[in-house]
Amino acid sequence: MIDGKDSGSTDGGALSNLRVLDLTQVLAGPYCTMLLADLGADVVKIERPGGDLIRSNPPFVDDADEEAYGGYFQSVNRGKRSIELDFNEEADREDFLSLVEEADIVVENYRSGTMEKYDLGYETLREYNPQLIYSSIRGFGDPRTGETERQGQPSFDLIAQALGGVMEITGQEDGPPTKVGPGIGDLFTATLNCIGILAAVNHREQTGEGQYVDTGMYDAMISMTERAIYQQSYTGEPPTRRGNSHPTLFPYNAFETADGYAVVAAFGTNHWTEVCAAMDRQDLADEYPTAADRLEHREYLRDQIADWALERTTDELVDALEGRVPVAPVQNTEEIFDDPHVHARDMLVPVEQPGSGEDVEIAGSPIKMTETPPEPRGRAPLLDEHREEVLGEKAETAADD
């Protein structure tokens, strides 16, 4: 519970006037619709028989047999309502189409062509609701916005990071290509898709027109690796892994300390001067006064900073530079949970974990607004928890008409 609200609360929020039919599962699609739910949209999660594939994924608080779902599902499906529909059944397709008639947005992340198999593709749905915004998240986009031979192939975060150049530029210089820890192939794509949906909503407000919004994971990763793209164009050489360093800025790196790691981003001359003062190395400030000088001699200077860092704990290094130089410890999640800043910013939010008798904490919304602040609006739904509520609303509306 959050302030007495259970799953699917739609009180307030900048998007409280919008109804979203969420046909997505796993990560990319649910993250996109979670953003909309946090902003106040009424998100109805329409689940296939048996529910979202990740309902049973761990971790659990205690007993997987007693708890309704694990942390994966909880995190990206909070604040939604759930109904279970089987599109192989005519009655369920009719129920879905009845909801489409009054929905604002439909979001799905099936393979290209899946909805068309049930005669529920965009062209069909817009006959029922010409103002509908239909949004898809796919590995390789939709043929409607640019057809390629990859469409229809399955894709996951790892595939998108590999194809989009992320893995090639991530990892240690002498190590293998490495995926970024969080599923950015899903999460960044989902965020871009959310932006596209909101842009389409604004367009509809001006024109009355609905439209199709399409975001591909491969496309999104090319956008995210923007630096590598322009480097290839400008230099004619494909950039590769540089560990924690930066190709054109120095110092900008992680340094091992006596008890952990800290990062220092001191490529500005004012910051470099402060680092040299903290190290008691005025000679380095005098000998390497410009950014070009420091970049040319980066290996030698990195060694000097590294030697200094190893003689100090992480706290000592941060204390020596904080407030004058961009510096931070490399934190694990336990340290994040202990950080007062995180709590002051409401970035850890308690929600009920059904079947456990306990609350758990999930990541809050980083979008802050003064009048309509986004927030997780309750726990994730039980499977089909809101069938009577959602379909009953439709029946009530029809009776009123």
Image: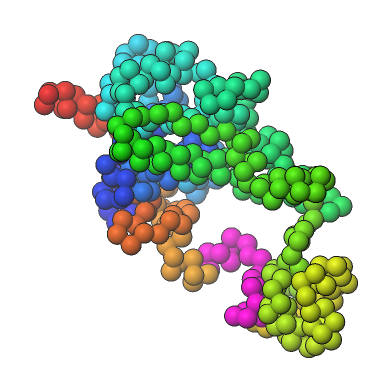
**Quick one: quadrant of the C terminus?**
top left
Which one is nearer the viewer's eye here, 206 or 134?
206
Please identify the residue farthest to the top as the structure is shown: 90
As for residue 223 lying within the magenta part, the answer is: no
Q: Nearer the viewer, residue 362 or 180?
A: 180
Q: Position of residue 19 (x, y in %)?
A: 31, 36
The percent coordinates of residue 59 (x first, y second) are 55, 45
Q: Is residue 96 above or below residue 35?
A: above
Q: Residue at the location (42% across, 62% down)? A: 346
Number of callouts:
0
Q: Start and end of the magenta stretch?
A: 321-338
Q: Is residue 205 left or right of residue 157?
A: left
Q: Residue furthest front?
A: 234
Q: What residue is rendered at 50% in x and 31% in y?
A: 214
Q: Nearer the viewer, residue 139 or 228?
A: 228
The residue located at (53%, 26%) in the rendering is 145
Determine the residue positioned at 63% across, 35% down: 218
Residue 92 visible in rendering: no
Q: Position of residue 232 (x, y in %)?
A: 76, 45
> Residue 336 colored magenta?
yes
Asked if residue 246 is positioned above or below residue 107 in the image, the reply reads below
Direction left: furthest residue: 400
355 to the left or right of 257: left
What's the image's color scheme?
A: rainbow
Q: In the rendered image of this protein, does residue 368 appear above or below residue 129?
A: below
x%, y% of residue 263? 69, 68
Instruction: Classify residue 184 by image quadrant.
Output: top right
